[in-house]
């Protein structure tokens, strides 16, 4: 059985070391914020200028001025800080973010990521993805395993425009956890009762 989004988030949290920082991309990765145990003391960074996000706010504490990079309202933890965009991207480009977790459209065996545009379709903006994949110490992609037409999104080489080259450390899908090695994907873990054949990944790029 494939993992739920919450189970995928828990698998990713298991890779986090205590007292580190993580940037969570828009969409699916935002679910991670509410799955991090308090005793890990993780500081969640948002590139619009927040360090110390703690998930979604309650109705009595929601504020329209407290948002993440995806314009969703957020809650903050004790010790949180706020800063301008130049400081935020200085943290990213300076290598001060330990982990970033982004969504993905495609990841290939050469550790390349495509996640920002589909040619011919409207592009709302790139955000901080290109900075994050090159500035963070570890890049984890959290995405659905299959595209809408049922083909696997783990490929020998990305077809879509690249976000970053040779940047992806881990990929977590509802089917399992994969590490791109340069010419193959190593299977680190599969969801319960998921077989290699059900992954629909070319056999010659599976380790």
Image (cartoon, helix red, strand yellow):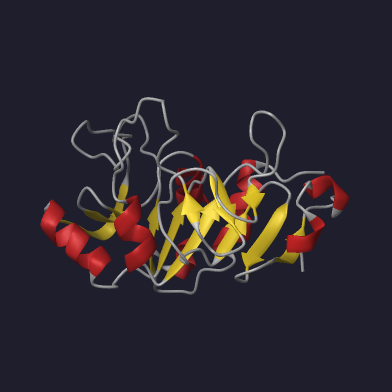
Q: Quadrant of residue 12?
A: bottom right
Give 112 or 170, whichever is nearer the viewer: 112
Q: Where is residue 69 in the image (x, y as percent from the top left)?
A: 29, 42
Instruction: Indicate the position of residue 99 as horizontal and vertical percent values.
Output: 42, 65
Residue appearing at x 69%, y 43% in the figure: 152
The quarter in which the C terminus is drawn is bottom right
Above or below, comparing residue 71 to residue 50 in the picture: above
Image-based side of 91 in relation to 116, left or right:
left
Question: In this rendering, does residue 43 appear at all?
Answer: no
On the rendered structure, is 85 left or right of 159? left
Horizontally, is 3 left or right of 130 in the view? right
Spot occupied by residue 87 in the image (x, y as percentages of width and height): 13, 61
The x and y percentages for residue 186 are: 71, 68
Front residue of 106 and 101? 106
* Residue nearest the viewer, comparing 21 with 115: 115
State left or right for residue 66 relative to residue 97: left
The residue located at (33%, 34%) in the rendering is: 72
Name which quarter of the figure residue 159 lies in.
Answer: top right
Q: Residue at position x 47%, y 69% from top?
A: 40
Q: How many marks?
A: 0
């Amino acid at each position: 059985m494939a993992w739920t989004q919450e189970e995928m988030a828990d698998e990713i949290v298991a890779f986090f070391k205590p007292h580190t920082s993580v940037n969570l991309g828009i969409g699916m990765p935002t679910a991670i914020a509410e799955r991090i145990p308090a005793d890990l003391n993780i500081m969640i960074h948002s590139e619009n200028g927040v360090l110390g996000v703690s998930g979604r706010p309650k109705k009595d504490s929601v504020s329209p001025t407290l948002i993440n990079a995806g314009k969703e309202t957020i809650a903050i933890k004790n010790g949180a800080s706020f800063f301008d965009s130049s400081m935020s991207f200085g943290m990213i480009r300076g290598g001060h973010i330990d982990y970033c977790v982004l969504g993905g459209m495609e990841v290939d065996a050469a550790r390349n990521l495509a996640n920002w545009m589909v040619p011919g379709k409207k592009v709302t903006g790139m955000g901080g993805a290109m900075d994050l994949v090159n500035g963070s110490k570890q890049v984890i992609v959290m995405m659905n395993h299959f595209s809408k037409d049922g083909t696997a999104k783990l490929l020998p080489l990305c077809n879509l425009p690249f976000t970053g080259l040779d940047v992806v450390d881990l990929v977590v899908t509802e089917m399992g956890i994969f590490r791109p090695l340069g010419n193959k994907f190593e299977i680190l873990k599969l969801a319960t009762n998921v077989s290699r054949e059900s992954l629909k990944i070319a056999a010659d790029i599976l380790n």
